[in-house]
């Protein structure tokens, strides 16, 4: 049985924790709103980009001269997994779900005899994957210093990926991130970015192309990679804040429950101590 | 006659207005799009994009991207776009420096040199 003083200290410490988690939750809520706005603002560009490239690739895709970013290298021996996670923890299962999906995919590919290379974005994913896949890691992009993810960050990552592709280091690139659905639900997603894949390739209106279709496509594909990475980064940002918000909400609630429980115990033992003292006094008086 | 003009960058939508004509710095030369233009997709070179509408002319500095022109509208997807009023000489210098840096590592010497020249010309138009 802990002493009354111990209990008192315990309650005070849990109360402090609750204050911290509450504050973190509120900060995340504010950041989430900003992240969602950023994701919203980026949507028109990504959608148009995708539509135009889908149209272009539908008309060029099958030809021999199609760019390698679209047609691929003709092999799928070496896979590059770009694993995008957060720089910070305390956000529930956010980082683990991405890492788990990536590890699953990596093991699947390794079992099929493929070569796997991993590029990590964000510290947490690297820490989790380093345990069993360290030998497959080829690089890391650090975003610790970045307060607000901008297109420039996406371009840096895209450049890193494209340089490796040009050097023939891999055949297929896939990005891993959490797609934001709601505050309580984020879906870990794997998306292939090289060779480019487009959904709903509709044959768009007949356009004049200036310069040629191939030249435009060659110009657009690298931008497309950057745009996809940027979209993923923004989704990830919103997901991270959403996950942290619900994790901190839970923590706050648990702290509240704990305080209630300890307060009950504290009051009970205080009562017991008083009763005990009373009994002692009374029986002492009776003995006289 | 007005038609729809959209200018979006990866980070935000800069303009979505009715315009009568849009002057585009195309990769193979400037072009002006008006209502009823043949559907065209063109890449952009660094330069000044102008949209003439009912409320006057709006100009933007763009560094690249592409434009999709249809009979009923123009949408420009610019890698980087800044309204001319916000384009200070210092900003233009930093953009120019960026293009120069990119040119330094590029394989395609001609294209890179052209991009630098275009950017320098746009810088010249802003003045100072």
Image (cartoon, coloured by chain):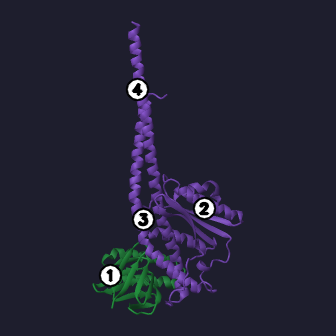
Chain colours: A purple, B green
How far is the residue under mark 1 from the one under mark 3? 35 Å
The spot of residue A245 in percent (x, y) is 44, 55
| Chain letter for the residue marked with disc 4 in the picture | A
Question: Quick check: marks 4 and 3 in contact, CB under 8 Å?
Answer: no
- Residue labelled with disc 3: A36
Q: Earlier in the sequence, mark 2 or mark 4?
A: 2
Which one is in front, A168 or A105?
A105
Callout in the foreground (2, 3):
3
The number of numbered discs placed on residues in the rendered structure image is 4
| Residue at 42% in and 69% down | A40
- Residue labelled with disc 1: B126
The spot of residue A49 in percent (x, y) is 48, 78
For the residues beneath circles 4 and 3, the answer to whether they share a chain is: yes
Identify the element where label 3 is drawn.
Answer: helix
How far is the residue under mark 2 from the one under mark 4? 55 Å
For the residues beneath circles 2 and 3, the answer to whether they share a chain is: yes
| Chain letter for the residue marked with disc 1 in the picture | B
Q: Earlier in the sequence, mark 2 or mark 3?
A: 3
For the residues beneath circles 1 and 3, the answer to whether they share a chain is: no
Q: Earlier in the sequence, mark 4 or mark 3?
A: 3
In this view, the residue farthest toward the top is A288
For the residues beneath circles 2 and 4, the answer to whether they share a chain is: yes
- Residue labelled with disc 2: A102
How far is the residue under mark 2 from the one under mark 1? 48 Å
In this view, the residue farthest toward the left is B55
B94 over A55 or under it: above or below: above
Q: Residues within 10 Å of mark 4 (few under 14, many from 20)?
A: few
| Residue at 64% in and 58% down | A133
């Amino acid at each position: 049985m802990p002493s009354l003083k111990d209990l008192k200290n315990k309650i005070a410490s849990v109360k402090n924790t609750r204050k911290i988690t509450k504050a973190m939750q509120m900060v995340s809520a504010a950041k989430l709103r900003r992240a969602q706005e950023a994701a919203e603002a980026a949507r028109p560009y990504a959608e148009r980009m995708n539509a135009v490239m889908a149209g272009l690739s539908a008309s060029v895709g099958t030809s021999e001269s199609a760019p390698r970013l679209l047609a691929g290298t003709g092999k799928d021996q070496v896979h590059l997994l770009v694993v995008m996670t957060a720089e910070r923890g305390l956000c529930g299962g956010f980082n683990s779900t991405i890492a788990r999906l990536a590890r699953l995919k990596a093991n699947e590919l390794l079992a099929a005899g493929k070569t796997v290379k991993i590029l990590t974005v964000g510290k947490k994913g690297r820490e989790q994957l380093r345990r069993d896949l360290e030998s497959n890691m080829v690089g890391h992009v650090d975003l610790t210093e970045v307060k607000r993810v901008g297109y420039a960050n996406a371009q840096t990552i895209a450049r890193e990926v494209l340089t490796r592709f040009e050097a023939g280091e891999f055949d297929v690139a896939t990005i891993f991130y959490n797609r934001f659905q709601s505050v309580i639900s984020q879906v870990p997603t794997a998306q292939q970015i090289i060779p480019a894949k487009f959904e709903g390739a509709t044959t768009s209106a007949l356009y004049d192309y200036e310069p040629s279709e191939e030249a435009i496509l060659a110009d657009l594909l690298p931008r497309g990679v950057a745009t996809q990475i940027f979209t993923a980064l923004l989704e990830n940002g919103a997901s991270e804040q959403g996950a942290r918000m619900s994790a901190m909400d839970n923590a706050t609630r648990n702290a509240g429950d704990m305080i209630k429980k300890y307060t009950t115990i504290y009051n009970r033992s205080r009562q017991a101590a008083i009763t005990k003292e009373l009994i002692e006094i009374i029986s002492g008086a009776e003995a006289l | 006659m007005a038609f729809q003009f959209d200018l979006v960058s990866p980070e935000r939508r800069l303009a979505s207005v009715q315009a009568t004509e849009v002057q585009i710095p195309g990769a193979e030369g400037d072009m002006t799009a008006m209502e009823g233009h043949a559907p065209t997709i063109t890449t952009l070179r660094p330069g000044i994009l102008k949209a003439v509408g009912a409320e006057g002319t709006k100009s933007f500095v763009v560094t690249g991207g592409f434009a999709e022109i249809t009979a009923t509208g123009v949408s420009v997807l610019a890698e980087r776009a800044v309204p001319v009023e916000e384009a200070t000489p210092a900003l233009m210098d930093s953009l120019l420096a960026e293009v120069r840096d990119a040119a330094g590592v590029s394989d395609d010497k001609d294209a890179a040199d052209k991009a630098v020249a275009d950017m320098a010309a746009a810088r010249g138009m802003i003045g100072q």
